[in-house]
Image (spheres, rainbow, N blue to C red):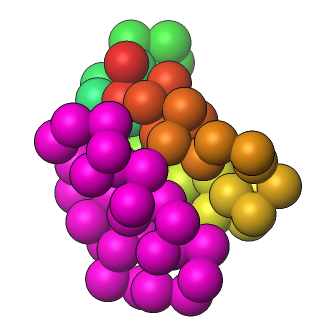
Amino acid sequence: MNDLQRRELVEATKRGDKKAFEELYRETERSVYFTCLKLLANEDSAKDAMQDTFMTALDKLDTLDDGATMMQEIQD
């Protein structure tokens, strides 16, 4: 997924498009999970942290000037 596609999904998510958020989730869940797992060294804790990460991202998405940047940071 390129930056333009990611930005479009973020903007759609800001407008309440649940499918756009689902797609962002699918695109980033693996990297978020493995980052959490690396930091926490526990599968259950990593799953909890991943859930918290996505809930926070969704909650704060509308406060960003460029939400695509946040999603890129999460993915990296």
Q: Which quarter of the figure has residue 15?
A: bottom right
Report whether residue 14 is seen: yes
Q: Which quarter of the figure has residue 30?
A: top left
Query: With respect to residue 16, does 14 lie above or below?
Result: above
Query: With respect to residue 8, does 15 lie above or below?
Result: below
Query: With respect to residue 32, does 7 lie above or below?
Result: below
Position of residue 64 in the picture relative to residue 9 (left or right): right
| In magenta segment, residue 62 | no
Position of residue 26 in the picture relative to residue 24 (left or right): left
Q: Residue 35's x, y, as percent?
A: 40, 20
Report whether residue 56 is seen: no
Quadrant of the rendering where the C terminus is positioned: top left
| In magenta segment, residue 6 | yes
Which residue appears farthest toward the front when viewing the image? Answer: 4
For the point 16% across and 42% down, which residue is it?
1
**Along the line of sight, which residue is nearer the eye, 74 or 43?**
74
Q: Which SS type dominates the magenta stretch?
A: helix
Q: Number of numbered discs present?
A: 0
For the point 60% across and 47% down, which residue is it?
67
Q: Residue 47's x, y, as percent?
A: 42, 46
Position of residue 21 in the picture relative to residue 22 (left or right): right
Please provide the residue range marked out in magenta: 1-27
Q: Residue 23's x, y, as percent?
A: 26, 65
For the point 32% across and 36% down, which residue is it?
3
Which residue appears farthest toward the left when viewing the image? Answer: 1
Q: Which quarter of the figure has residue 54?
A: bottom right
